[in-house]
Image (tube, grey):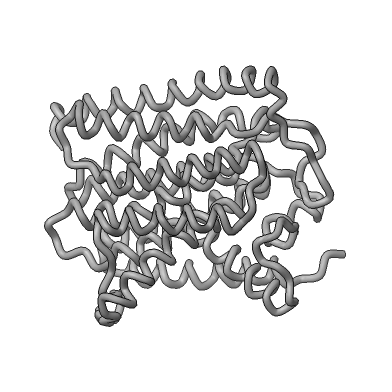
Amino acid sequence: MNLASVIPAMILFAAAFLASLFGVRFFTRWSLSRGLLDVPNERSSHSMLTPRGGGLVIVLVCLIGYLVIGFGLGLPISWGYFVGALLVAGISWLDDLYSLPFWSRLIVHMVAAVVLVRDTGFWSELFLPLISVDIAIGNLFGLVFTVVWVVWLLNAYNFMDGIDGIAALQALISCVAWAVLASVLNMPSAFLLSGIVACASAGFLIHNWQPAKIFMGDVGSAFLGFTLAAMPLLARAETQLNTPILPIVAVLFVWFFVFDTVFTLIRRLLGQKRFWEAHREHIYQKLIIEAKDHSTVTLIYGFASAFLCTLVLLAIILSGIFPWLALLSLILLTLLVIYLGIRKIS
């Protein structure tokens, strides 16, 4: 990147951080005045009334920033992503206000995913790194697979937003990783979007760190999940290079969120429980129940994610031994998470 492109990027990132930082402060006061509060129940990890829905500020900052990328800087943007993000944020905001039934949210999520995929395309083959094998999955299955990926991750991200700071920190780490990768692969729009989301998440995180002054709400967590699910599709649509590694990278950048939700889903299905209902059976929730404070658990997930993201980036950029180190770290850290998830609480 040259100086002419770095300066606008830094201005945009700083503006996103400051807009989020002060916007959330204003929104907290507004939420308190309107009584928009999260009321703790037996499934909550919190014990105090706390303003919620602050993720709306992240949504507004990121989408306005995305329009600046397109209209202010003249770079290509995806209207499928923009419209899909609006749909996800809109239904999630209504859910924060009125607690909508699961099926109504799922329908809108599916529509948003289809709108995104219609604009950016979908994966018709999957690439297996290390052994460098492409697996053709066909157009029909590829379309279904890509839509399911988007819907799954935005809901998984929502499920994982249960303690102070965890969702905002994961978004910050993942989007910094995406920004580095986009810079290396010369994808300016993806670089700027990921940087904006990272900075907006950082501004929110200051208010959401334990003890949280405000919660993100479904509007923020679902939007971030949708955005992180969309990143490989946006990058794929922008780059002219053959980059089959992008779907794998997308999973690895949010691996511990993905694994926690998959692991918990399987356990709940085996126990014949309704997977869409609120509960306290996620691995991170078990750690909280064991009297570990929110910030400690959030940092455990954050450090693990940052470590894996770093190795994945080194594996892509430098190759050599780093792909094998990334695989080894993935296995060892996942085994540790499994242990935390199956051990008995004393």
Residue 184, relative to residue 143: is it above or below? above
Residue 346, relative to residue 271: is it above or below? above
From where the camera sits, is residue 168 visible? no
Q: Residue at x 28, y 32 (%)?
A: 67
Tell me: 177 left or right of 169: left
Residue 156, relative to residue 16: is it above or below? below
- Count of labels in the image: 0
Counting from the top left corner in percent of width and height, residue 203 is at 49, 28
* Residue 183 lies in quadrant: top left
From where the camera sits, is residue 226 visible? yes
* Residue 159 lies in quadrant: bottom right
Which quarter of the figure is the C terminus placed in?
bottom right
* Residue 320 lies in quadrant: bottom left
Tell me: 247 left or right of 268: left
Using the image as rendered, state which of residue 24 and residue 202 is in the foreground. 24
Tell me: 148 left or right of 125: right
Q: Residue at x 47, y 26 (%)?
A: 20
Q: Residue at x 49, y 62 (%)?
A: 152
Counting from the top left corner in percent of width and height, residue 322 is at 34, 66
Tell me: 22 left or right of 248: right
Counting from the top left corner in percent of width and height, residue 340 is at 69, 66
Which quarter of the figure is the N terminus placed in?
top left
Counting from the top left corner in percent of width and height, residue 150 is at 42, 59
Q: Residue at x 74, y 44 (%)?
A: 293
